[in-house]
Amino acid sequence: MKPHLKPLVKNLLSSRQADLLAAAPADTLHAPSRPYPNGWFCLAFTDEVRPGSVTTRPLAGAEVVLYRTANGTLRAVRPRCPHLGAHLGVGGWVEGEDIVCPFHQFAFGPDGTCVRTGYGEPPPKASLSPYPVCEANGSVYVWWHALGLPPQWDVPLFPMDDRQPFSHDTFDLAGHPQDVIENAFDWGHLPTLHGLKGLDIEGAPVAGQQVGAVTATARGTMMRGFRQSYTLTVIGLATIAARTVLPRGAGSLYVMLHATPTGPGRIQLRFGTKLELSGVPGLPDRMGRAAVMPVARLLSAVLQRVASVDTGADLLMWHHQEHVEHPKLAKGDGPIGRYRQWAQQFYTEPTGGPAAPRPSRTEAIRAEE
């Protein structure tokens, strides 16, 4: 990273918001025009939704209440109580397997149906409005679709040890998920913004598939002084998951980058790091991993701080970036045109709003040649 960028990045990381007086956020300079994409979006890391907890998170101009029952069942619902409209995330609580409304203490079971009232009368025929929710790779995903359609695909699972959580941070930014996920295919910024050297990278999204992969080898990554190989897995317009297998079977390093649309031209950026070390020789794998987990968690927190500096440079760019619908691409930029064509599968024209403009396939491919 160039030295003059470091003070700006440190200011962003310390404030949790890119509130920089030198330039206005992108969404204040030009009205956001791109719709929300369809797909699975991360609203929390798993350790943020503990048994008995109730959490409210923004998603696509609305709110989602996440809660986990005493037995560990995860649920995501719209905030409104069907009785008289109280917000379940403002004073609501979990009682066993039920979530209880703070207004009249109506309780709703894991399937969303009302099971009792706060004053002993028979419950009405009423149910909460659920969102599809899943847990994968230490992250909590909620499905959103412009037309309210059910999930069309699944989030892939990585060979992680779920007992160890991520070290993570969340930032509120101007931006759009498509521009964040484009980072995986914007190969030109890796040496210029992040200082990677000897970069050998390949991969492009495949039409009709919701998950793509990029493989790379480079020097100048978090493992300073080593030539490091890693795989980036792109999950819809929501997640870039990086996995590095450490030398000599020492373990794996995972870095998760989640972009979640919260409102027009705004996103929450969740960033997490987890180092999983191999077990102790002579012990069964699960026991060996547990033995070294305290060290792994400590190192994960350290690596999260190191990685945040590099990722902070990207956050700085996204917060002030104006989306260029027809970019003047150069050789060496990476398969950005192919990515943008691939990204169109995640949009549905919503009522009263235009779909994202589609560059012609010929134009997109020609720009990369």
Image (tube, rainbow, N blue to C red):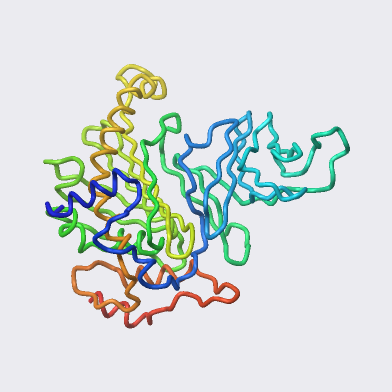
Q: Quadrant of residue 159?
A: top left
Horizontal placement of 334 versus 339: left or right?
left
Examine the rendered structure and indicate whether residue 367 appears above or below residue 101.
Answer: below
Q: Position of residue 14 (x, y in %)?
A: 29, 43
Up-down relation of residue 19 to residue 101 (above or below): below
Q: Residue at x 64, y 49 (%)?
A: 79
What is the number of callouts on the image?
0
Q: Residue at x 37, y 70 (%)?
A: 340
Q: Residue furthest right?
A: 122
Q: Position of residue 118 (x, y in %)?
A: 79, 34
Nearer to me, 88 or 287 = 88
User: For residue 251, what is the image quadrant?
Assistant: top left
Q: Position of residue 86 (x, y in %)?
A: 69, 47
Residue pictured at 11% horizontal, 41% vertical: 225
Q: Quadrant of the C terminus?
A: bottom left
For this view, does 2 lie left or right of residue 12? left
Place residue 322 in its image quadrant: bottom left
Residue 66, given in percent of the width and then of the height, sits at 58, 43
Residue at image coords 52%, 42%: 135
Q: Residue furthest front?
A: 21
Image side of residue 283 versus residue 222, left or right? right
Q: Residue furthest top?
A: 282
Q: Is residue 59 left or right of residue 116?
A: left
